[in-house]
Image (cartoon, grey):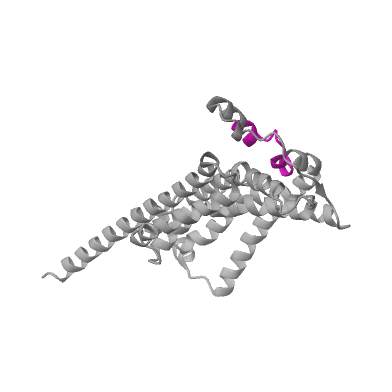
Amino acid sequence: MPLDQASTEEKEMSFLDHLEELRWHLIRSFAAVVVFTIGAFISAKWIFQNIVFAPARTDFPTFKFLCKLGDFLHYEGLCITDIPFKVQSRNMTGQFSMHVMSSFIIGFIVSFPYVAWELWRFVKPGLQVKERKYSRGAVAAISFLFFLGVMFGYYIIAPWMVYFLANYSISDMVVNEFDITSYVSTVVMLVFGAGLLFQLPVVIYFLTKVGIVTPKFLREYRKHSIVVILIVAAILTPPDPLSQGLISIPLYLLFEISILISAFVAKGMAKEEAEELRREEAEKLP
């Protein structure tokens, strides 16, 4: 049956057709999250013991590494041997609600590459040929940065935050005994937030493409970013330069990478504009 497939594929979709297409991408993404959420829910005891509560123990890999580093540098201040930490459940639904919430977050984190791929499949047909070329590997880059941020939040930020808050005291009369909802929410916010924070290079890439951000703008605010990063590191870590550097250096490198990406995109856009201008001038010549 002779059909013009090319014209069929290029036919513009109506607004409702776009909504229907988006709906199915979202349904498939949500189904993937639900599948991994169920798996995390079933494995709750192992997950809470070995993942959720792990940053509150002195045998956590981050604290063990710091102890070994302290022994190597002959600096005992890096070794953390005690975390005065207790978790309670003061609400009747506290443990169950945290069980569900943590399972959903873990399910979303594990299924993130598939979710990103589904959203990319929806966005890709609306891009031009050049935009598709420059965006090749976008899903892999987004997923890599997300998991890198999650690892950074889990192994660097979360244990330091737990250690800081567990030892923080305004009076000897106050004993730190945290509610499970508070603990899980804090750890999840830090880990998931770090994963989103590491999407900064991707965000800068697209903001530069649409002309909202420029390399010059980012360079002008470099000093401001350094101050903010140092303040965050000082709040999260004990008052020693090495601990603060473990957090501040990766965040600053992330900002510098974003500047390089913005400069690369801006250079490519300027080159395309120059070529387009030359073509227009050539067409005007007799």
Please tell me which residue lies in front, 1 or 95. 95
Nearer to the camera, 127 or 143? 143
| Count of number-bearing discs | 0
Residue at 54% of width from left, 61% of height from top? 122
In the image, is 137 to the left or to the right of 24?
left
Residue 63 % position (x, y): 64, 35
Side of 58 where 118 appears, left or right = left
Instruction: Confirm whether the magenta stretch covers residue 53.
Output: yes
Examine the rendering and report whether any part of residue 131 can be seen.
yes
Q: Is residue 32 visible?
A: no
Specify the principal SS of the magenta part: helix
View extreme (right): residue: 92
Please check the rendered image and state whether residue 18 is part of the magenta-colored stretch, yes or no: no
Q: Quadrant of the C terminus?
A: bottom left
Q: Where is residue 283 shown, x and y percent of the image?
A: 18, 68
Residue at 50% from the left image edge and 42% from the top image edge: 245
Q: Residue at x 37, y 51 (%)?
A: 260
Compared to 97, does 167 lie above or below? above
Image quadrant assignment for residue 77: top right
From the top left corner, tell me how far across and down residue 155 is, in percent. 61, 41
Where are the magenta residues, as a range?
A: 51-66
| Front-most of residues 211 and 163 | 163
| The image quarter in which residue 115 lies | bottom right
The x, y position of residue 28, in whole percent, is 66, 56
Q: Is residue 71 left or right of residue 212?
A: right
Instruction: Give the farthest residue toward the left.
Output: 286
